[in-house]
Image: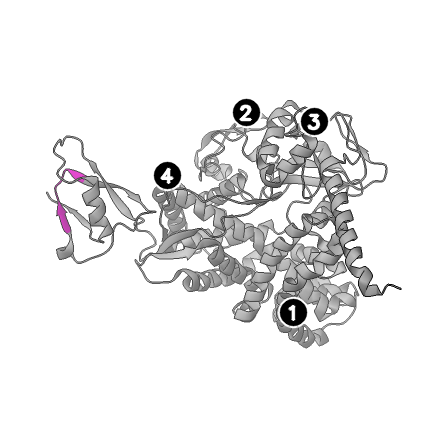
């Protein structure tokens, strides 16, 4: 008679082989009831063409998106985008966007797609957190309406966190790991609002909060690549590190919830809430739970778990966005003039008005700052989908072009291809930081849209009504689009504009020769995680930007060079100054190599007159 121990090994092997076989069949060969007449992006003729296209999607999804968009979407034809990790998706042309957005949630569900993509039933710590978006309701009602109340706190935290991460030594260049430092900065800013000053400066809480949000994204990505049958077994191992950090978060949240709970009782008048003593997420959540008479939502466990997940939603996209924006500015051919233009706007608005308080009405005046961030989001975003929904009616749904999609089919539009369409955004692959602000700065302008060309005239004040960072359109879907566009985008936009404005005013960013690549993980587009920049604290927020090739030394240490040469450019990756002959001089006594050696030695160049 066999013992149970003897049977365990073969059973595990069988489960692994069987689940892998099912996974391969579903991802490579199963059509899942999709219409036969819809073309597949990247699939040529041949029996295995769709399987080959599915394989390509693992590391070449970007190319498949562009291929399908150019071949089919621009001809008003839907197509199927193969996706080895999450299954094939039906991508609609832009002409069917209106229909897509009009469908009710009981027919097409955007929540279901997000739920499946993040494996919310496993990564979000508690079934209620994944199922009931109470935290989103609380944030939308409490935080969005009172953003101006937190302006001074956010500014205070920006100054504190930048000093910690980038230093305050004036004129001293410092190399920083951009993503890591922005992770710390954004975590501090968001937690200053969500949990207050004391906790946001508690290093253990801050570290665990940051690590939880980093690991949650990685865990979801790995679960997408795991066969369905193995996920229940794999997820406890993948989530172990997440729970480790959650427990450290909970250690700090539990006592606060227990201390405040006696202040509340069922039937409280929520409309007349008083947050004068504590104005943070814990207070909002408790008030919401008691006003809705929901005992489970009042528990320290559920409040702390919602807060941990909320940190992921509130922080991750902002970290990616500011990291991308700063790399885009640094890698631009006109990096120094871009910084000067942004600094000029920010300095003029903050100095010309004694009432400038960094509130929303003031931030709306920073149209170049807004445009620089919006343009970076257009180029990179953080996910390639603009709007993606799942068919949730059992009988399926028929799209405007006549194809029937069965229950469970994912259908939507791609933002990445639209954002890089030359017919919508001229020179679409280039970072043009003032692409959107030109619309507002020019009293008479022509705006080119996806619907065609129309002339718009008006004063600069009227022009300020042009779309800003938070505005989603058919051609700008960085925050998604429609009624389910990101509810936290108002807070995120304010935070990002405040942060970029302060960076530009108080730091120089050294130009870089080329921009580091953004890695793709399935539909997600990550920032350059390990790339570095050099920054230095500025003495005067209004002075022109300096470069690493112009150190401050005593005048008697300056190197004299003939007037035939001037310093033309700084190659920041090598830290060298490159000389160029002035016109009218034919006797170049000092060549580029000598200038390079001079600059590398740290001596300034003084032109001999």
Nearest to the observer: residue 151 or residue 200: 200
Give the residue at mark 4.
333
Query: How many angstroms separate mark 4 from mark 1 (CA)?
Result: 47 Å
First reached walking from the N terminus: tag 3 or tag 2: 3
Specify the segment rendered in magenta: 559-565
Q: Are marks 3 and 1 in contact (CB under 8 Å)?
A: no
Instruction: List x then y, in percent, for residue 482.
Output: 67, 40
- Quarter of the image where the C terminus is located: top left
Residue at the (79%, 56%) spot, across then down:
10
Give the residue at mark 2.
453
First reached walking from the N terminus: tag 2 or tag 1: 1
First reached walking from the N terminus: tag 4 or tag 1: 1
Give the residue at mark 3.
39
Camera-nearest label, 3 or 4: 3
First reached walking from the N terminus: tag 3 or tag 1: 3
The verdict on residue 560 being magenta is: yes
- Quarter of the image where the N terminus is located: bottom right
């Amino acid at each position: 008679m066999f013992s149970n121990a003897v049977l365990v090994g073969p059973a595990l092997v069988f489960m692994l082989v069987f689940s892998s076989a099912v996974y391969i069949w579903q991802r490579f060969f199963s059509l899942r009831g999709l219409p036969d007449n819809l073309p597949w992006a990247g699939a040529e003729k041949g029996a295995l063409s769709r399987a080959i296209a599915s394989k390509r999607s693992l590391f070449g999804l970007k190319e498949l998106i562009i291929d399908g968009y150019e071949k089919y979407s621009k001809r008003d034809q839907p197509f199927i985008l193969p996706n080895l990790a999450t299954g094939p998706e039906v991508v609609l042309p832009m002409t069917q966007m209106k229909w897509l957005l009009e469908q009710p949630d009981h027919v097409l569900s955007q929540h279901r797609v997000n739920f499946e993509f993040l494996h919310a039933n496993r990564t979000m710590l508690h079934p209620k957190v994944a199922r009931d978006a109470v935290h989103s309701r609380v944030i939308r009602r409490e935080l969005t309406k009172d953003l101006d109340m937190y302006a001074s706190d956010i500014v205070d935290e920006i100054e504190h966190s930048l000093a910690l991460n980038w230093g305050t030594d004036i004129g001293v260049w410092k190399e920083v790991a951009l993503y890591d430092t922005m992770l710390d900065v954004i975590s501090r800013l968001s937690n200053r609002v969500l949990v207050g000053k004391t906790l946001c400066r508690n290093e253990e809480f801050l570290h665990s909060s940051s690590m939880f949000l980093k690991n949650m994204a990685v865990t979801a990505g790995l679960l997408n690549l795991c066969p369905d049958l193995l996920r229940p077994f794999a997820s406890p191992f993948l989530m172990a590190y997440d729970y480790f950090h959650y427990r450290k978060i909970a250690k700090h949240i539990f006592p606060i919830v227990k201390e405040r709970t006696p202040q509340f009782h069922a039937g409280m008048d929520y409309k007349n809430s008083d947050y004068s003593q504590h104005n943070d997420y814990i207070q909002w959540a408790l008030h919401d739970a008691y006003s809705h008479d929901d005992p489970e939502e009042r528990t320290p466990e559920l409040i702390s778990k919602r807060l941990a997940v909320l940190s992921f939603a509130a922080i991750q996209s902002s970290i990616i966005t500011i990291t991308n924006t700063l790399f885009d500015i640094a890698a631009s051919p006109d990096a120094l003039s871009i910084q000067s233009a942004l600094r000029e706007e920010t300095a003029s608005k903050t100095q010309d008005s004694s009432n400038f308080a960094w509130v929303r009405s003031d931030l709306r005046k920073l149209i170049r700052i807004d445009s620089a961030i919006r343009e970076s989001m257009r180029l990179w975003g953080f996910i390639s989908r603009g709007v993606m929904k799942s068919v949730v009616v059992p009988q399926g749904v028929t799209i405007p072009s006549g194809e029937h999609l069965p229950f469970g089919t994912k259908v939507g539009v791609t933002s990445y291809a639209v954002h890089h369409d030359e017919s919508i955004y001229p020179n679409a692959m280039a970072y043009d930081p003032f692409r959107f602000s030109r619309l507002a700065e020019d009293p008479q302008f022509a705006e080119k849209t996806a619907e065609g060309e129309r002339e718009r005239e008006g004063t600069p004040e009227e022009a300020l009504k042009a779309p800003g960072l938070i505005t989603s359109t058919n051609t700008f879907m960085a925050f998604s689009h429609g009624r389910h566009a990101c509810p936290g985008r108002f807070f995120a936009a304010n935070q990002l504009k405040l942060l970029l404005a302060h960076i530009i005013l108080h730091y120089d960013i050294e130009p870089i020769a080329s921009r580091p690549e953004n890695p793709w993980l399935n539909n997600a587009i990550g920032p350059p995680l390990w790339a570095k920049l050099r920054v230095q604290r500025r003495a005067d927020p209004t002075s022109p930007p300096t470069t690493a090739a112009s150190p401050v030394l005593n005048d008697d240490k300056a190197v004299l060079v003939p007037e035939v040469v001037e310093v033309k450019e700084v190659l920041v990756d090598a830290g060298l100054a490159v000389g160029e002959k002035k016109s009218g001089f034919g006797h170049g006594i000092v060549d580029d190599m000598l200038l390079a050696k001079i600059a590398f030695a740290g001596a300034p160049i003084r032109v001999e007159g």
